[in-house]
Amino acid sequence: MRLAWFFLASIIMMTASLDAQDRSDDLPQEVKRHGIALLIGYAWVPQTVTSEGGSELTIIPSIGLDYGYEFNSKFSLVLINDIELSSYLIEGRNGTTIKRANKYIVALTPLYHVNHWLGVYAGPGIEYEHSMSFYILKAGTEIYKHFEGNWGVGFSVSIDFNKSYETFSAGLGVSKGF
């Protein structure tokens, strides 16, 4: 749990320091209200149970497809869809072992654009898995570079909180506005 709070505090401090360095809020001329992003990345699960009964950090490949609607130059609403491509066991906070296999995460998060290349978000979601699902709080930040034709590339880091454990994620994405 301490690692989760450290990760979240790091995201906030990184966002604040980056905002202090660049106050230019000029968005590209033809920003579209709708956008999709395809992301590939990794999730880190610190409480994975080994076959010997110990605990270890597990790194899992993931893919995501997000949809966003931009209300104005400062606020968007993003529907985040991620799939973790692996099976593993988690040791929950109450000592129980929880099986996770190719879990699907969906979250609806408000996104605040600190400036034209940096955004922070947090919102509710659900982690679906065939044996057990959880409500989550997803929080993170993203850094994007916009190009002509409403294309963009970016990097994001996030954390998913649920009642039994946390998952940390990082990924690279390509976006298109329409």
Image (cartoon, rainbow, N blue to C red):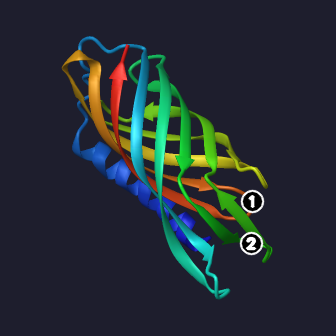
At which x and y percent is residue 59? 47, 66
Q: Is residue 131 above or below residue 44?
A: above
Residue 64 relative to residue 148: left or right: right
Query: To which quarter of the image does residue 166 belong?
Result: bottom right
Residue 155 relative to residue 167: left or right: left
Mark 1 residue crowding within 10 angstroms, few (<14) / some (14–19) / many (20+): few
Q: Is residue 160 above or below residue 66?
A: below
Q: Amino acid at mark 2?
A: Arg
Asked which secondary structure carries label 1, the reply is loop
At which x and y percent is residue 68? 48, 25
Lower sequence index among marks 1 and 2: 2
Residue at the spot x=74%, y=72% of the render? 93
At which x and y percent is residue 83? 55, 46
Along the line of sight, the residue nearer the viewer: 172 or 71: 172
Residue at the spot x=71%, y=50% of the render? 129
Residue at the spot x=23%, y=16% of the render? 149
Residue 173 relative to residue 90: left or right: left
Q: Are marks 1 and 2 in contact (CB under 8 Å)?
A: yes
Residue 137 relative to residue 43: left or right: right
The quadrant the N terminus occupies is bottom right
> What number is the disc on residue 61?
none
At which x and y percent is residue 71? 48, 17
Q: Is residue 83 above or below residue 24?
A: below
Question: Label 2 belongs to which residue?
Answer: 93
Asked which secondary structure carries label 2, the reply is loop
Question: Label 1 belongs to which residue?
Answer: 163
